[in-house]
Image: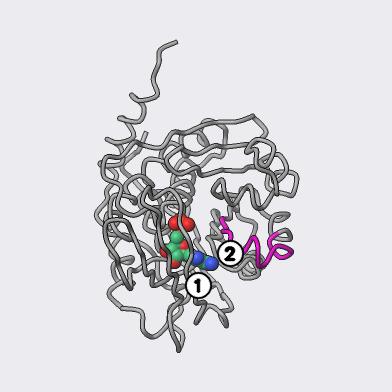
């Protein structure tokens, strides 16, 4: 299922690059390299060429960008601006299932205007990672008819920038969000009803991430469910959602089709890659991950859900 070559169809990823301060049950960690674009590009690059458009401040370590490049990520679109890098401060509950944002400092993101390098404009797969929806819209005006446009968002933007987000929803094919965000966006607790409501706002396809309860795909074919890989050592779920979205896009690009079977496989692969993210603080597990490890865990997941005919 996971071949050895990477796709030649690049995935363009726009999102945040960040310093995260994390209060985890097992450890407090400061200045952890994070951000939606960081996680998504690391996971997409397992399957496909990934290109990043993001901004960092002059305090962002060169080494962190070099790490992305060493994993095969095209970093030409990462802008270094004067000022401080975006910072997110989060506290996790003991069970890791819920978290509270303690602080969001936009810093260089406040004045960021994404400008795609000419070579990026024809990228066939576009992932609008979690970032201000106005920036997501700005990127959309600069691309040339991608095969697939997927977007992610989070509570911060759903409550703070709802009108702009609704505008974005009309222009994307696929929305990838977690269940809490889905409920908030749809103003409806029931996931099935909320999914129908959000699909009526624009995206034909909706992928709902439900943490340890797996992920669901809602599209014209109905509903598909991918379980989460059961982990023994859950350390830090930060970025698992972005990792999921990046792997989904990278895998779809490698498959080259968007049919139902590819979508289903992509969800299983994305669930598998996201599970690795949770095993380390920040990106620590992802930066050493390879496709052979993903393939092995994917087979475990297959065994887990097999129940004969
Ligand atoms: P996830 O755990 O997948 O929801 O993603 C967590 C990552 O999102 C962290 O690394 C943060 O730096 C980043 N993040 C948190 N809040 C925002 C925000 N409002 N806009 C963009 N990125 C954010």
Horizontally, residue 186 falls left or right of residue 271, namely: right
Compared with residue 41, is residue 78 higher up or lower down, i.e. above or below?
A: below
Image location of residue 269, percent across then percent down: 41, 39
Q: Which disc is residue 156 wearing?
A: 2
Q: Is residue 101 magenta?
A: no
Point out the tag, 1 or 2, that comes first from the N-terminus: 1
- Res. 252 in view: yes
**Which quadrant would residue 222 be assigned to in this image?**
top right
Direction from residue 172 to residue 12 in the image, left or right: left
**Residue 36 visible somewhere in the drawing:** no
The C terminus - image quarter: top left
Q: Residue at x 38, y 72 (%)?
A: 19
Mark 2 Cβ inside 8 Å of ligand 1: yes
Magenta stretch? 152-165
Q: Are marks 1 and 2 in contact (CB under 8 Å)?
A: yes
For label 1, the SS is strand
Which quarter of the rendering shows the N terminus?
top left
Q: Residue 303's spot in the image, x, y percent?
A: 33, 24
Q: Which residue is mark 1?
A: 104
Q: Is mark 1 within 8 Å of ligand 1?
A: yes
Q: Residue furthest front?
A: 94
């Amino acid at each position: 299922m996971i071949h050895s070559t990477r796709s030649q169809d690049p995935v363009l990823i726009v999102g945040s690059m960040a310093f995260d301060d994390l209060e985890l049950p097992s450890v407090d960690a400061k200045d952890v390299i994070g951000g939606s674009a960081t996680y998504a590009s690391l996971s997409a690059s397992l399957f496909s060429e990934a290109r990043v458009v993001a901004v960092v401040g002059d305090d962002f370590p060169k080494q962190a960008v070099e790490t992305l490049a060493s994993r095969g990520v095209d970093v030409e679109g990462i802008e270094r601006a004067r000022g401080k890098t975006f910072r997110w401060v989060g506290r996790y509950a003991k069970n890791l299932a819920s978290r509270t944002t303690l602080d969001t400092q936009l810093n260089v993101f406040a004045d960021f205007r994404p400008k795609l390098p000419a070579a990026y404009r024809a990228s066939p797969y576009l992932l609008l990672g979690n970032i201000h929806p106005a920036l997501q819209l700005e990127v959309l005006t600069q691309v040339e008819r991608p095969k697939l446009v997927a977007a992610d968002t989070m509570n911060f933007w759903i409550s703070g920038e709802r009108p702009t987000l609704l505008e974005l929803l009309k222009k994307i094919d696929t929305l990838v969000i977690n269940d809490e965000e889905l409920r908030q966006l749809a103003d409806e607790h029931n996931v099935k009803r909320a999914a129908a409501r959000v699909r009526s706002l624009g995206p034909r396809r909706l992928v709902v991430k439900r943490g340890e309860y797996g992920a669901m795909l809602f599209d014209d074919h109905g509903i598909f469910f991918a379980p989460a890989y059961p982990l023994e050592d859950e350390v830090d779920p930060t970025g698992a959602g972005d990792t999921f979205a990046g792997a989904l896009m990278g895998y779809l690009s490698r498959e080259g089709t968007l049919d139902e079977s590819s979508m289903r496989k992509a969800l299983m692969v994305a669930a598998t890659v996201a599970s690795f993210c949770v095993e380390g603080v920040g990106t620590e597990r992802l930066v050493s991950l390879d496709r052979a490890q993903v393939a092995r865990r994917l087979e475990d997941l297959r065994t887990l859900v097999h129940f004969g005919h």
